[in-house]
Image (tube, rainbow, N blue to C red):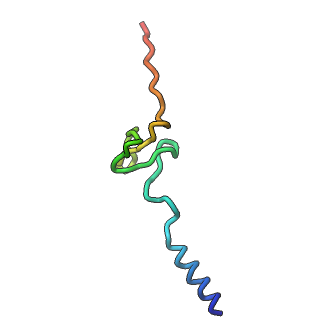
Amino acid sequence: MAQLFLLIVALVVLGHLPPGRTEFKRCWKGQGACRAYCTRQESFMHLCPDASLCCLAYALKPLRLPKPDYE
């Protein structure tokens, strides 16, 4: 009976904990993170819906293509 009680208490406590890695919201197709500041290994891409920065690692940053000259 004591084991059943401990199991119920453990399940209730674990049910109230947030899932892992929820400190940052994801952005840029799930590859970036919304933060107040980007780290040295990241660059700012755009603003997240909550007005924080969408930080993306330099290795994942898309290359800018030159604009074509139409004359």
What residue is drawn where x is 46% and y is 35%? 61
Q: Residue at x 42, y 6 (%)?
A: 71
Residue with the most extreme top position: 71
Going 45% across and 14% down the picture, which residue do you hit?
A: 68
In the rendered view, tell whether residue 30 sits above or below residue 1. Answer: above
**Relative image position of residue 63 (x, y in whole percent):** 47, 28
The image quarter in which residue 55 lies: top left
**The N terminus: image quadrant:** bottom right
Quarter of the image holding residue 3?
bottom right
| Vertical placement of residue 49 versus 2, above or below | above
Residue at 62% from the left image edge and 92% from the top image edge: 2
Specify whether 15 is left or right of 48. Answer: right
**Which residue lies most toward the bottom here?**
1
Q: Indicate the position of residue 23 as horizontal and vertical percent values.
A: 43, 58
Q: Is residue 55 left or right of residue 10?
A: left
Residue 57 or 11: which is nearer the viewer?
57
Quadrant housing residue 44 = top left
Residue 62 location in percent, x, y?
48, 32
- Provide residue 50's location: percent of width, then percent of height: 37, 51
Number of on-image labels: 0
Q: Is residue 2 above or below residue 7?
A: below
